[in-house]
Amino acid sequence: MAFPGRVLLSAPLRLGASLFLMLALAGWWLSTLGAPEATLLLRDRHGQFLAEVTAAPDDELGYWPLRELPPRVVAATLVAEDRRFWQHPGVDPLAIARALGQNLSRGKRASGASTIAMQVARMQHPGSRTYWRKMVEMFAALTLTARNGRTVVIEQYLRLAPYGHRIHGIVYAARRYLAKPVEDLSWAETAFLAAIPQAPAHMDPYRESGRARARQRARRILAALHGQGSLDAEEYDLAQRQLEMLAIPPLPHRRPEALHLVERFREWALSPDVRRTLQGQIDTTIDLDLQATVEQMARDTVDGLERRGVGNAAVLVVDRATNEVRAAIGSANYFDKRHAGAFDYTRVMRSPGSTLKPFLFAYALERGVITPATILDDIQRAPSDIINADEAFLGPMLPRVALANSRNVPAANMLALIGLDNGYAFLRRLGLHDGNLRPQHFGLGLSIGAMPVTLERLVRAYTTLAREGVFGDLVWYRGQPFAAPQRLLSEETARQVSLFLADPMARLPSFPRMGPSEFPFPVALKTGTSSRYRDALTIAYSTRYVVGVWLGHPDHRPMSRLTAYHSAATLAHDVLSYLHRDQGDGLEDLQFPPPEGFRAERICALSGRRATPACDHVVLEWFRPGQEPVEPCSVHVQLAVDSRDGRLASVQTPPSFAQVRSFVDLPPRYAAWAAAAGLQRPPRDISALGGRTVVAAAVPDGDTPLVWPPAGAKVPQLRLVAPDGGQTIVRDPEAPQARSTLALRVVVDPPVEQVVWYVDDKPFRLADYPYTARWPLAAGAHTFQARLPLEDIRSRTIRVTVQ
């Protein structure tokens, strides 16, 4: 039955229309241009092959786009693959006819008819080699050419074509096989590369047989180019000779000591934000030869210290002038599974120990909270029960000496002085943390390593000191985008801290002379050992480099009482000595430059005042003009004493018994420390021979003579410093009774001979100068007070609960 107005198609026509529509749709889909992400070809700063980083499927390589079409490459490629490319619409009817004839005559598939456009469609969407697939590719080729034009099609082919060894694209092939830009290829090199895509596996440039096949086909390509007039006779003759002499450099391999670097760049390649800045050939700042040398040093160090619990090491070497990373050792051995060598320990959060202290001192100097002459106390535990690593106290200390000796107590007190919030905020500006936790989470422990950081962040922060106050990103490759450098410290402050860290005398007594912290050239150095010896770090910088070293065990296992000074500092010394091997003769200036315009002054290490002849420990310190100490030291005094009783000599003391002796008269808060240190107090009583006290034998710098004891003594004031009021103490039931005690300390100003300790308003102990005592712990709530004997002068009362 027929329906008016409709055209009925026969079944064959409907089938043909359907097939055509399917081919058209499939062809349209295959004609969409696309390519995998371009491979990153990593080289070191001297052009040595480092690695290839790819995000393409099956780890295929290359896919570099052409900036422009090199005429030689186009000519050779078309001669080899598609001679009528510029004439046909994407499918070559003559080639199809020729292929059909050859295949029918031989009874098998002996020839293809794929044009450049058809190959592009196939390379973009690989599939089986069937006649149906060939038909789809033909439709795709027609669509490709119509949609994009022939120039775009040849560009896409030259980006996708296979050149063996998983390499795609002639731009990458030129770099990889011939180590040159595609634009610089000779006719011989161009023909050689153009020959490969026809059979990449059989024309392997790294095999002699493959090179021979590629040369044979390249000769035919050159002959065809000469025949069509692309080469004149002279060029053709030269190309043939060059083809025979063509040498392919050996196949480069990734260096095992750089595998952590490769992983770093691989992560960046997969990051959309960073990937946009990474294109094609990446010239890194790494020196591969230095990388290998430093890794071997790290491996030797770990091997030598393994019996003491060291499991791995990490090292960063940064060029001080540019912040470029010269070497980055993520572990001593990437393949050491026993010690988790595949982890990059430059990026692992670990305790920094004492290595954050220089930044707190720098902040305090910058803000005027301290000066180089400020005296910092190291006489008792700091708040939060922070104690020094050696569990000893060194008394009054200058900032230079406190920092160089890495004293925990002055550092914690310093952080309390500048404010926990301020110190934490400054460390964030230095990139040491992201502010995810409140500063109270770490407390004053922030000053001694409570906040974990990575070695990478730590080294970056230290470049601020090395570069005289300017903070900037570490640079890993040429053309790397980075934030504009920021000045976080004045040049004067940064130089001052560098002088502190570079002074070997200031490190005494904690760190001996002539050890791994001393060099025959200027080096500022800070060590850090974390709690229970889990981490050992050293950051050192010279006039050329900043070096960071970490040693430890991957599972945070404590090392065998191994400090950074005896481990990480030794490795840092080896690295810097190698980097400065041209300065090993010790003829260089051993000091960093002082702050510009500052003047050096001799000051007393105990008082921070202008040194006098009586001072036995003098430090040369730098001050801004007008800010240097003016008052002479009054702590060191030289007095005439009667040698018979050690009391002050009088005018009646026979000269043969009058001796001039040096004494240290510290403020009352140092009484307990001074007594423990064996410092001799000035006598306050006149010799039994009677008479008026002798004038001090030594008069500092011509000042007014000292008369001893000073006149105008005031009423003594008693200030309890231990225990802290309001605290609750929990006894350890397993501790011996002799150790279950509470320290009692009081400051008496001016000093007296004795005090009486009262516990629960009852006399407990009569204590001689310096008045310290220990009270056996007893459960319950208790009160403590110090009083002067036979006088109504007393301290405040504090309360402590013992559980």
Image (cartoon, helix red, strand yellow):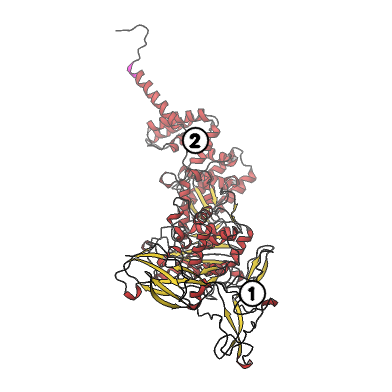
Residue 335 visible in image: yes
Does residue 775 lie above or below 484 as drawn? below
User: SS at mark 1?
Assistant: loop
Q: Earlier in the sequence, mark 1 or mark 2?
A: 2
- Between 520 and 792, the residue placed more toward the observer is 792
Q: Is residue 347 magenta?
A: no
Amino acid type at circle 1 is Ala
Please identify the quadrant where the C terminus is shown. bottom left
Residue 102 is situated, as x and y percent measured from the top left of the image, at 42, 34
Which circle marks residue 765 in the picture?
Answer: none
Amino acid type at circle 2 is Ile
The residue carrying mark 1 is 611
The residue carrying mark 2 is 116
- Between 39 and 357, the residue placed more toward the observer is 357
Q: Which residues are magenta?
A: 5-12
- Between 718 and 244, the residue placed more toward the observer is 718
